[in-house]
Structure formats: structure tokens, C-alpha cells
Image: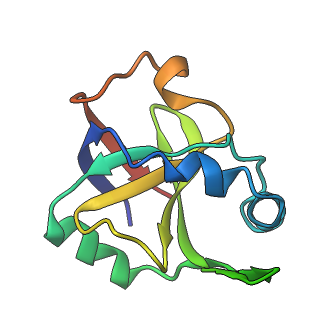
Amino acid sequence: MKNEVNGIIVRGLGEGAYFMSMQHYQKEIQKKLDFKAYPGTLNLKINKKQKDSFKEIMPIRINGFKQKNNEYGGADCYKAKINGINGAIISPHLTKHKDIVEFIAPVHLKSELRLKDGDKIKVELI
């Protein structure tokens, strides 16, 4: 089954880079998704119907963890690609986003694909 998600690139809250830089998440992504994630996410605004379609797919679970007095949530990931670049949609269990999905990849996608906020993009789920 070929599944696609269409979205519009939007500016995020800046939190993706912080979380994606954490060693725990880096190790989990490397082990479970088989790539070293660039420390940041590409934020895509999608409609609710598309976001709900992820419920039909078995996610790859990234575990949360505790560090000192802080608890960091896990995430569900879905292998995907944008313009031939493999990565994953990552859906944190704790998020403020309602109609936004985040995409992680081994490269900085905006630079690599010359993308900017407001661009329409197609994500192919694999």
C-alpha cells in the first residue's frame, strides 16, 4: 500500500532541535530507524484526516526516559521519504501540535532540498 501525506512546511517551536540532540533519542533512532538523525525536525501542517490515517499503520516506538528530575516522553515513528531522502515522521507522545507532523532525516532537509516555509511537500510513507 502506497501512502502519501501532503503538507505545507511551517516554522516550528524550535523544540525539535533540542530533543533531537539528546543522546537517548539519537541512540533509539539509530537503533530502530537505522539512521543518525539530523538534530532538528521539518514541520509540516497537514489536515486532521491525514493525521488520523497514521492510526492504520503500526508505529515504530521510540521510548521515553528519565534524566535527573525530568521525564521525557516517547514517540511513534513512521518510515517515510521526501524527494528520495529516507527518514521518518515522528509523532511525540507529548506535544502541543494538533495539525502538525514532524519529519526527521539524516540531513537538514530545508538546505538539502532548498525548501522554505510555505512550500508544499509530499511525504511518501514506506
Q: How many marks?
A: 0
Above or below 48: residue 73: below
Residue 3 shows in this picture: no
- Residue at screen point 16% across, 69% down: 48
Residue 56 at what x, y percent from top left? 36, 83
Q: Quadrant of the N terminus?
A: bottom left
Where 91 sits versus 20, above or below? below
Q: Residue at x 55, y 69 (%)?
A: 77
At a point 33% along the width and 22% down the height, the residue shown is 116
Give how far across and how far down residue 103 sits, in percent: 48, 50
Coloration mode: rainbow
Using residue 59 as the reference point, say whether residue 33 is left or right of it: right
Residue 10 is left or right of residue 69, and the answer is left
Q: Could you say where residue 47 lies in the image, as x and y percent from the top left?
A: 15, 61
The answer to whether 19 appears left or right of 7 in the picture is right
- Does residue 94 appear anywhere in the picture? yes
